[in-house]
Amino acid sequence: MATFRIVSTKQRPCGAGGHIEAVGVGDGSSPSGQILSVSDVHWRMSQGDTFYTYAHGLRADVRKFDCGCTKKTLRSAPDATVHNNLDNLPQFS
């Protein structure tokens, strides 16, 4: 089992607000990190790997999430700051 820090996201709008399509994982030294699709992240989670974001000294765990448009995506756990939310991380295309 491994732990991965998500440092960036690829997002797409939808009728339910939007969702994450891919993430960049790494230590933050690279702008986008190693790119993983949401399917890859879901599979790794099913194998016991964990994912998180980190900003302003706070960590937020990342979980599987079913968007209102029925797409399987990701969501960061709610906590005391919006800075570590997946939606607020740097984006790549």
Image: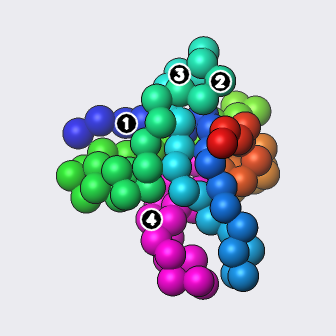
Q: Do the residues under discs 2 and 4 have CB atoms within 8 angstroms?
A: no
> Dot 3, crowdedness within 10 Å: few (<14), some or many (≥20)?
few
**Tally of marks:** 4
Residue 45 visible in the shown view = no
Pointer 1 or 2: first along the chain: 1
Between disc 2 and disc 4, whose residue precedes? 2
Q: Are dots 1 and 3 in contact, CB under 8 Å? A: no
The answer to whether 75 is drawn above or below residue 23 in the figure is below
Is 64 one of the magenta-colored residues? yes
Query: Would you name the residue on which mark 2 appears?
Result: 31
Instruction: Estimate the spatial distance between the alpha carbons at disc 3 and disc 2, rounded to whole Å.
Output: 10 Å
- Residue 93 lies in quadrant: top right
Residue hosting label 4: 64
Q: Amino acid at mark 4?
A: Lys
Q: Reading the chain from its start, which is encountered first: label 1 or label 3?
A: 1
Q: Position of residue 38 (x, y in %)?
A: 44, 55
Q: Amino acid under label 1?
A: Thr
